[in-house]
Amino acid sequence: MSGPSCPSMLDRLRQKLITFWRGVRNATGDDAYQRYLEHWYAAHNDDQTQPLSRREFFQAEQQRKWNRPNRCC
Amino acid sequence: MPLTRTTLLKTLVWLSVALAGAGAIGAIALHRGESINSVWFIVAAICVYAIGYRFYSAFIAAKVLAVDASRATPAERFNNGRDFVPTNKWVVFGHHFAAISGPGPLIGPTLAAQFGYLPGTLWILVGAVLGGCVQDFVTLFFSMRRNGRSLGQIARDELGPLGGAVALVGVMTIMIILIAVLGLVIVKAMMHSPWSTFTVGLSIPIAILIGLYMRNLRPGRILESTAIGVALLLGAVVAGGWVESWGIGHWFNYDGPTMALLLIAYGFAAAVVPVWLLLAPRDYLSTFMKIGTIFALAIAIILLQPEIKMPAVTQFIDGTGPIFAGTLFPFVFITIACGAISGFHALIASGTTPKLVSNESEARFIGYGGMVMESFVGIMAMIAACVLEPGIFFAINSPAGVVGSGAEAVANISAMGYTVTIAEMQELAGQMGEETLFARTGGAPSLAVGMASIFSGAFGGMLPALWYHFAIMFEALFILTTLDSGTRVARFMLQDLIGNIWPKFGETSWYPGVLMASALVVAAWGYFLYMGTIDPRGGINSLWPLFGISNQMLAAIALCVGTTILIKSGKLRYAWVTGLPLVWLVIVTSSAAWQKLFSPDVAIGFLAQANHLSAQLQAGELSGEMLEHAPQLIFNNRINAGMTVFFLLTTWVLVLETLRVCYREISGRSQRPSSEAPYVRTQLPEHA
């Protein structure tokens, strides 16, 4: 059986959309903080320190990003 | 045998790509009719890029650079979840493209259309696949092999302190000229245009609003903030059209010099406020707009398939063109830098990008492929410039100081063989919602007219005036981003430089130092910008070549570094890959610089112009504004000459230094070891 009502096709479409949305968030940096946290917990799991808060993270990132040429002609 | 069949099929496919490309290039090169369809340009470009990417970049990756997919990249080795992060190659491609493409590939081809569509188009295609793409790819790769170091650091490591210092000072000077010329482009687009000024002006509070939202209300929600910002910007484009009917048009109506002063004041303010308030949020908006508009333009061109009305070659290849002076060689290669080869890319390719690439094998797609994309933007700009009637194109882009204004301009341009009437120009200005389109130099207005005619033709529904001001807003948005970020980076470099003598000045947290350094940088580009607005030849005529020379000089620096590394790593027989574009650029920049310095033609030579003006001044031949501005213009021409000498010297010092280092290397007297980081095997699952 096929057609738009077929559940497997809908599932696949949903999966495609989710992948696309993840890509968009990844490309725009919308998920940068989540990625930072994932990395932080993987790398510092036995540490006593705390990761940066969302706000601190974005402030630090913006400072770093604009301290060197990153926009061209 | 299946293998042979696939090979045969592939060969046939590539053979047909080659034939289609050759056919399309032949068509645009040999065509001599009334008009030619833009589809030929698209086909020629895509085939040239496909062949360049499939064969030449593969050759460079495999033989010249010996890309090694098993080697861990800096992103993997230094992964800190922040700047060093192994990232999906499409995402890195997006970031890299957004960083390298700015107003350059839009403006350069528009100006170079003065020579006809053919010279610029060929240079964009050939320059990109053999020069620009190679430079970007090689620089990205060598930076990745050196822990993501910057071009300046690599130059110091590989060539020695002199090479490093020259590269650093060169970069700072280029930044100044780049900002000045881009500033001039938007000043020319916004002067006496209340609609544009209102829309672009409103983009500043919109950016600030988004900045506050992104910092205080919803930290780091980039997509949602950008969506709000883009909606507000589109609203600002529409609202600009009502400014006149609200009776506040005169609040937004300024002449060139006033607009320049406003921009200078803005530039200083933007440089000293924190990045989160203005620069960062505007960058999100401009990146989104840029990528969206470029895609929309590509779709519109493919849907509409507009006719190209510009001849293949105009008589102005002899150097008598009204938009900028100078013969086809070397000036077409200077006018189109971005889109063919742009040295500035080397800063990006040795900046953020090498820290994100997760595997060496992806450097080809990102470095070479990213530049292919930018080159295609250049081709689209060329199409947008050439869909205009040539008479209209020249009337918009020729400064009043060269062709006169109004009826005089129409008569002069028509006498050159490109018929245009006052009525046509008035009708067009009316359609675009502008007071006049005469002498709107700088390339942005004519590009906007071209884009407006393509967009309204392909998508319909909307008035050309809205598309026109949308295009102006889109150009201004990322010019302002380049202006802000360039000022900021030049400020850091200056603080760093002066910090060697006066350490306190070098502290980036010392606010008086920040203010002083910002003021110095803004004053430097502000000077060139202001002079550009009082120059009767329109300013672009002097500043754009200076920018082209400096940008190509930076490319020469990057290629010097690349060639040196190739020779040091025992690849002498492949050194031509970077060596040939280097030789070509040195020939082009040197001869252009020489002509800008010593040409006796007052339209070309800075010194000739200075001498001519001072002779006129002494003989009492000047009156009115010219009399008032003459001493400044004479001084400015000498400053421009000084800058040209500086660029020429910088290039040659670096070339000679490269030759010296390479000669020592070849003759076996090497002293400076390669700075390549040692091999570490990748642990990333897909490549390990």
Image (spheres, grey):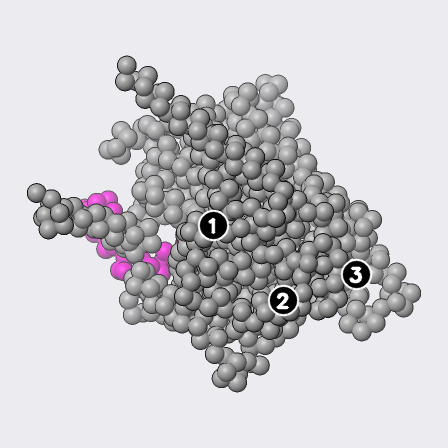
Whichever of labels 3 and 2 marks the residue nearer the N terminus, that label is: 2
Secondary structure under the numbered disc 3 in the rendered image: helix
Q: Find residue B435 and report its horizontal and vertical position in percent.
A: 60, 73
Whichever of labels 3 and 1 marks the residue nearer the N terminus, that label is: 1
Q: Is residue B181 above or below residue B149?
A: below
Quadrant location of the C terminus of chain B? top left
Magenta highlight range:
A39-65
> What residue lies at 90% left-to-right and 65% top-to-bottom?
B618
The residue lying toward the viewer, choosing from A49 and B371, is: B371
Q: Chain of mark 1?
A: B
Indicate left or right for B370 with B666 as reference.
left
**Residue B120, numbered circle:** none
- Residue pushed farthest bottom? B247
Dividing the picture into quarters, in which one does residue B85 lie?
top left
The residue lying toward the viewer, choosing from A70 and B48, is: B48
Q: CA distance from mark 3 to mark 2?
A: 34 Å
Q: Chain of mark 2?
A: B
**Residue B305, numbered circle:** 1
> Tag 2: residue type?
Met
**Residue B634, numbered circle:** 3
> Tag 1: residue type?
Gln
> Tag 3: residue type?
Ile
> What residue lies at 79% left-to-right and 61% top-to-bottom?
B634
Q: Is residue B462 magenta?
A: no
Report crowding for label 3: few under 14, some 14 to 19, many 20 or more residues within 10 A (C-alpha).
Answer: many
Q: Is residue B238 visible?
A: yes
On whether disc 3 and disc 1 are found on a single subunit, the reply is yes
- Disc nearest the viewer among 3 and 2: 2
**Residue bearing mark 2:** B425
